[in-house]
Amino acid sequence: MTDQWWKQAVVYQIYPRSFADADSDGVGDLRGIIGHLDYLAGLGVDVLWLSPIYPSPQDDNGYDISDYQNVDPLFGSLETFDELLAGVHARGMKLVMDLVVNHSSDEHPWFVESRSSTDNPKRDWYWWRPARAGLEPGTPGAEPTNWGSAFGGPAWEYDEQTGAYYLHLFSKKQPDLNWENPEVRQAVYAMMRWWLDRGVDGFRMDVINMISKDPALPDGKLPTGRAYADGSASYIDGPRIHEFLHEMHGEVFQGRAGLLTVGEMPGVTVDEAIRYTDPAREEVDMVFQFDHVWADRGPDPWLLMPLQLTTLKAIFGRWQAGLADVGWNSLYWNNHDQPRVVSRFGDDSAYRVESAKMLGTVLHLHRGTPYVYQGEELGMTNAPFRSIEDFRDIEALGQYTDAVTKEGRSPEEVLTVLRARGRDNARTPMQWDASPQAGFTTGTPWLAVNPNHTEINAAAAVADPNSVYHHYRKLAELRHTEPAVVDGDFTMLLPNDERLYAFTRRLDQTELLVIGNFSAETVRAEIDDAAAWAAAELVLTNTAAPTDDLTLGPWQAVVYRRMLSR
Ligand code: TEU
């Protein structure tokens, strides 16, 4: 195994709360995951990433952690965790944990101490600030800065006990840790080593490019019509971020082999990503960038913008070129924060199966490590939320409140966007079979199962050789057997085409051609060498073979391979 084994790996993300419920309380658990390990091994994935399973008040479904070194009883125990880890390793897979250390829960003992008095030794472990000069502490507008939190409301919470405010970029139950304090950093590193010593194989690091803040904490610019400003200029890729990640690498990862580290980094630029992922700098192996999942987002968050394929291609093209020589990309359409890709960029009705396979093919054939989010391999779709009462996500509920009560939007316009983009779309229970609760639970699920589970489910997909599941299995197999998928150079073709996504990959004498049709129309690919390509080996497609002039049917995807002469 080389040091960069993850270049050849496919990662599968599990959102434990929604994966499989073994104890019938309506919430998924570790025992449920254990029961499906053969399914995951059968898909051919190499790494499982678990969203947080630590003790938590569950204000943000576990991204608010009150004890970093245990398992929430909701999900199981450390003993069950060890059993899961052993089961994963026995099947030749690895297990990566979610690391959420930009913030803790407000119920974490660190914060309980920190808020108790201004002279507590842990006071400086979080970001405490006085009210804005001249204003009455605790009154609207007296917050230390005008920043909004990601989940609605201000990014500051007034704490009467000491008459000061603490910073929370997310919910008020997620106070931001102060990484300027070396004791905080050492406590986090010790906790990470403890998990690695237990046998885990790495970390997915939640919003890790936000841990270094400009201590001046200046106001942000207030956009017209919005209640709060965006403070991100002060904390995205902040002043000491590279120093902190390099220090973490030295303290935690140095001298350990076979690990995977991926930093979730909203707003990260290509230039910064080169620095984060340059192996010589010893920071992280790869990052999750957000440009492509923000491609259909306009300046007004409550206005749906359709995707321009040329925009999407320009984004991926820029990332592929930027990390071609130094660093490495991660590739994803979905995770627990994003709507289902077949509903977003594909066609989740007439061409659901075709478009789900096409989207998977295009993504997995890029250069980078692909991530599959639970249910993506089944072509699971967005859910039919009727009203705001159907949503559970703190982000959806908080943003709805701000938009409707503070910004005067109509409930219907806000709901339209939440239905299309809301995070709960990804969080409906995994669809295992056609039975009443989709085989997810025998109790009442915490979030309603999608009624389409009678048709879209794992049992049906495994039994059908033409399913999305088997296509994803073939994509993993292709990565494992064709070195050009892993290491080949990437060249974008047809950048101005609004329907076709086309590129080549080349490694030594092997060249691959990948084309995906992002439309329900029949489209001819006007590329050089079309006839020669059409005569080449068709490695993978999602429908019948295309005609010999490279005309693709609705939502068709093709992967050709040819050998170039020396
Ligand atoms: O998400 C980070 C993040 O930027 C989110 O705000 C995301 O962009 C947004 O929700 C999309 O609508 C991470 C976790 O993945 C998310 O689940 C957590 O809620 C968040 O951090 C706080 O820990």
Image (tube, grey):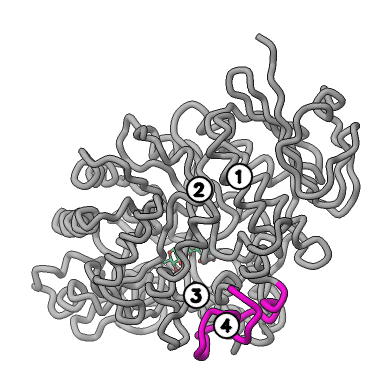
Give the mark nearer the N terminus: 1 vs 3. 3
**Residue denoted by label 3:** 18
Residue on which the image places disc 1: 364
Which of labels 2 and 4 is toward the front?
2
Q: Are marks 2 and 4 in contact (CB under 8 Å)?
A: no
Residue at position x 32%, y 55% in the image: 211
Residue appearing at x 73%, y 55% in the figure: 307
Which residue bears the numbered disc 4?
Answer: 391
Relative placement, left or right, of 74 versus 475 is left
- Between disc 3 and disc 4, the foreground one is 3
Q: Earlier in the sequence, mark 3 or mark 4?
A: 3
Front residue of 81 and 396: 81
Classify mark 4: helix, strand or loop: loop
Q: Nearer the viewer, residue 169 or 103?
A: 103
Which residue bears the numbered disc 2?
10
Give, as a single range, the part of the protein colored magenta. Answer: 432-455
Q: Can the viewer see residue 500? A: yes
Give the residue type that dot 2 points to.
Answer: Val
State the residue at coordinates (30%, 81%): 73
| Marks 2 and 1, how far apart at CA | 9 Å
Residue 308 falls inside the magenta stretch: no
Q: CA distance from mark 1 to mark 3?
A: 24 Å
Q: Is residue 446 above or below residue 63?
A: below
Q: Residues within 10 Å of mark 2 (few under 14, many from 20)?
A: many
Quadrant of the image occupied by residue 85: bottom left
Tag 2 and tag 1, C-beta contact below 8 Å: yes
Give the alpha-carbon distance from disc 2 to disc 4, as whole Å.
31 Å
Precedes in sequence: disc 2 or disc 1: 2
